[in-house]
């Protein structure tokens, strides 16, 4: 049996649709149970926070996981990336009220984000001094209240930014969901994982 960590929220809904399309029949139980099985009993699925998927996989609590590139890059987890699933599309961006806030290299830019590692690496690469302020939610408020000059955040449609008077200053990278594997499981359960990847590959290819 393979154990697969799925992220709560919209990405899990898209993941379940993908799994059902490739012949792995799954449905989330209506109870508060945090794990369930497919109809064949070959796969066990864990329901975890998106930010925790890579951790469950890295430490072998799950053999595989579905996780957004944004979370994977931020966590820098020691896992194998097996397949781009093409779902959960969004963009990691720098946004703010003033598009010129990145042009002055002589001043320190204050950046609010929950993606601290991504923000630090981005501004370091740019050669811009940045003070990174970690927030856990309502990131868009920070520039409006003078807490920061800009934010680093994940956006889908950009509607929330627009409604709060913010706009994209620069795109850092595009993000889609990835299938990741624990490094030990990849070898000890190679045949089972290979079969699972092949099923998903066919479905992803048909959508593309």
Image (tube, rainbow, N blue to C red):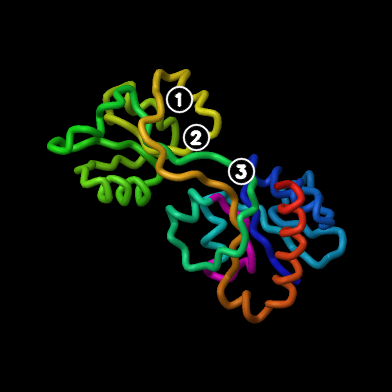
Dot placed on the residue nearer the N-terminal end, 2 or 3: 3
**Dots 3, 1 in contact, CB < 8 A:** no
Q: Is residue 119 left or right of residue 196?
A: left
Nearer-the-camera pick, 102 or 78: 102
Dot placed on the residue nearer the N-terminal end, 3 or 1: 3
Q: In the image, which residues are magenta? A: 58-68
Q: Which residue is mark 2?
A: 155
Q: Which residue is mark 3?
A: 88
Residue 71: x and y in percent read 49, 51
Q: Which residue is mark 1?
A: 161
**Dots 2, 3 in contact, CB < 8 A:** no
Q: Quick one: SS at disc 2?
A: strand
Label 2 environment density (alpha carbons within 10 Å; few <14, some 14–19, many ≥20): some
Q: Quick one: SS at disc 1?
A: helix
Q: Quadrant of the N terminus?
A: bottom right
Dot placed on the residue nearer the N-terminal end, 1 or 2: 2
Residue 30: x and y in percent read 78, 44
């Amino acid at each position: 049996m393979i154990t697969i960590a799925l992220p709560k929220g919209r990405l899990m809904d898209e993941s379940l649709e993908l799994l059902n399309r490739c012949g792995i029949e799954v449905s989330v139980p209506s109870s508060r149970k945090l794990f369930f099985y497919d109809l064949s009993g070959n796969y066990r699925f864990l329901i975890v926070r998106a930010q925790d998927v890579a951790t469950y996989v890295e430490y072998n609590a799950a053999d595989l996981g579905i996780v957004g590139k944004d979370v994977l890059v931020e966590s820098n987890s020691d896992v194998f990336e097996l397949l781009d699933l093409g779902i959960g599309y969004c963009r990691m961006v720098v946004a703010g009220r003033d598009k010129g806030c990145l042009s002055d290299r002589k001043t320190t830019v204050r950046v609010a984000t929950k993606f601290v590692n991504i923000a630090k690496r981005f501004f370091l690469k740019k050669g811009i001094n940045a003070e990174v302020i970690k927030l856990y939610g309502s990131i868009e408020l920070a520039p409006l209240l003078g807490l920061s000059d800009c934010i680093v955040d994940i956006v889908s449609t950009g509607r929330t930014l627009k409604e709060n008077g913010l706009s994209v200053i620069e795109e850092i990278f595009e993000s889609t969901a990835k299938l990741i594997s624990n490094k030990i499981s990849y070898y000890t359960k190679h045949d089972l994982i290979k079969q699972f990847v092949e099923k998903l590959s066919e479905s992803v290819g048909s959508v593309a």
